[in-house]
Amino acid sequence: MALKHINLPKTNHLILALTLLTVTLFDGGGSIIHGGYVQGAQAASNTERAAMRYRKDVMPNADSFSEKKGSPPVFEAYRRDPASGEDELIGYLIYSPDYPPEPNGYSGPIKVLVGMDLEGMITGVKVIFYRESLRCSSGDFLEEPGIESQFIGMSARDRFRVGKEVDGLSRATISMRAMSRTIRNSVRHVARAYLQ
């Protein structure tokens, strides 16, 4: 959509700037951080595309990945066997919105990309998107060092309890519980379908 330049009095510029600031504050910064408001299928498509940038982060031993397929949907991760030159399946990438219902954090669901090997062990976790009303004023809680990496090595059989198997995060208990449940539910769903 092309925008036309409109000459507005300076007071209208101030009103527009204050309106945008107000929307940004009530949105928790999500509209700035994630490139603006998008709705429905377009929003889902944008976050899934963003998730694909992190495939190698959550499955570091993979050389290639399939398109999303199967029921439940997964991205298969492959490593090339040096002896045979064949690609061998080493695990799955799990995109949490594909496994409803999504547990809500403080201000909504937390979309996560998870890598899981063929033994049901988590190889990596990346938070793709979440809204947090305190994000602008108090910082990005889920970007704290160690938050995502603490899930590496956990099994689909683990309980994922915050304060027990998962370290909590002061100021973000609700979001940490939602993130843990999101990861646990999606990993268990895939393990039941593909690893039995």
Image (tube, rainbow, N blue to C red):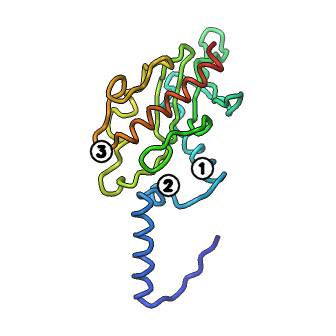
Q: Residue under circle 3?
A: 171
Q: Disc 2 residue type?
A: His
The disc, 2 or 3, on the residue closer to the chain's N-terminal end is: 2
Q: Distance between the Cα atoms at labels 1 and 2?
A: 9 Å
Looking at the image, residue 110 sits to the left or right of residue 192; the answer is left
Q: Residue at x 60, y 25 (%)?
A: 189
Q: Residue under circle 2?
A: 34
Do the numbered discs 3 and 1 sit on residues whose CB atoms are within 8 Å? no
Q: Position of residue 147 (x, y in %)?
A: 36, 34
The disc, 1 or 2, on the residue closer to the chain's N-terminal end is: 2
Q: Position of residue 87 (x, y in %)?
A: 65, 18
Q: Distance between the Cα atoms at labels 2 and 3?
A: 23 Å
138 vs 88: above or below:
below
Q: In which quarter of the image is the C terminus?
A: top right
Query: Looking at the rendered structure, which numbered label has been put on residue 46?
Result: 1
Q: Distance between the Cα atoms at labels 3 and 1?
A: 28 Å
Q: Which of marks 3 and 1 is in front?
A: 3
Q: Which residue is drawn at 40% across and 33% down?
A: 148
Do the numbered discs 1 and 2 sit on residues whose CB atoms are within 8 Å? yes
